[in-house]
Image (tube, grey):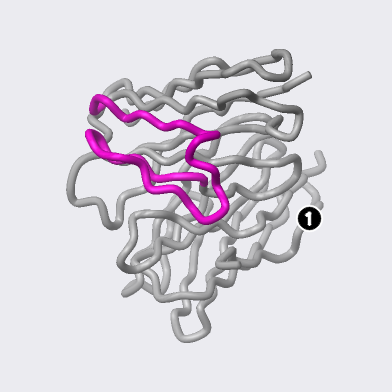
Amino acid sequence: GAVVSQHPSWVICKSGTSVKIECRSLDFQATTMFWYRQFPKQSLMLMATSNEGSKATYEQGVEKDKFLINHASLTLSTLTVTSAHPEDSSFYICSAIGQAPKINQPQHFGDGTRLSIL
Amino acid sequence: SQQGEEDPQALSIQEGENATMNCSYKTSINNLQWYRQNSGRGLVHLILIRSNEREKHSGRLRVTLDTSKKSSSLLITASRAADTASYFCASSIQGAQKLVFGQGTRLTINP
């Protein structure tokens, strides 16, 4: 149980393109989803926390207008990288937790999306 | 930075040996979690230890937590080639839902 599906797994596109990444919880209701960014051989850096039906909470230094997050349902959150540039190339990973109690629950991760901007 | 520290950054051992990874964190926590990441993949949850627990076992994994030192360790016994991966500790900060990840340990098990 607790499967999170992330799509697409790999995206290559031209500079200036907007790219949407989907994160779905397949067998549980995810009240909270998280979006991370990971550079090669580095750790995960949290970008934002997304609660269903409300605006995402962004970490310091993350541009809200650049990385649009929508969490419209209990099973789907999307991250849109707007007008992507080569410096946005990275590995993006989502995770989700189920309904209460939220403390002392592990996060369930998708398999990540490798974004390459040419 | 809130990011935790892990050591060693890289560890290479022979199959069958034990592997120990250490983690330190900076703030009060609800729990401390360990995850594994195979190259190019997402993270897989291994074990969660609550702030009021000192030791926890799961199969070949043993985790300890010392809240006075703000540190944790992960021991993998009788390592196998399939254990080759990066291992991350993540602290669940009190009063917040988010996790703060350590820098990770790249473990290589040589057959």
Indicate the chain on which mark 1 is placed. Answer: B
User: Which quarter of the rendering shows the C terminus of chain B?
Assistant: top right
Q: Nearer the viewer, residue B22 or A88?
A: A88
Residue A61 magenta-highlighted: yes
Q: Quadrant of residue B36?
A: top right
Percent position of residue B7, x then y:
71, 66
Q: Which residue lies at the image location 51% right of the left edge and 19% below the top edge?
A: A20
Q: Nearer the viewer, residue B53 or B95?
A: B95
- Characterize the local packing of mark 1: few (<14), some (14-19) or many (20 or more) Cα atoms within 10 angstroms: some
Q: Quadrant of residue B20?
A: bottom right
Give the residue at mark 1.
Answer: B10
Residue A93 magenta-highlighted: no
Percent position of residue B58, x then y:
43, 52
Residue A114 located left or right of residue A87: left
Percent position of residue B63, x then y:
49, 63
Percent position of residue A103, x then y:
27, 57
Q: Amino acid at mark 1?
A: Ala
Residue B76 located left or right of residue A23: right
Q: Nearer the viewer, residue A36 or A69?
A: A69
Q: Which residue lies at the image location 71% right of the left edge and 48% below the top edge?
A: A42
Q: Which residue lies at the image location 33% right of the left edge and 23% below the top edge?
A: A76
Q: Nearer the viewer, residue A98 or A38?
A: A38
**Residue A81, placed above or below residue A57:** above
**Residue B58, placed above or below residue A7:** below
Q: Which residue lies at the image location 60% right of the left edge and 55% below the top edge?
A: B76
**Residue A58, placed above or below residue A73:** below
Residue B75 located left or right of residue B98: right
Q: Quadrant of residue A66?
A: top right
Specify the farthest residue to the left. Answer: A100
Q: Which residues are magenta?
A: A47-74
User: Which quarter of the rendering shows the N terminus of chain B?
Assistant: bottom right
Identify the element where label 1 is drawn. strand
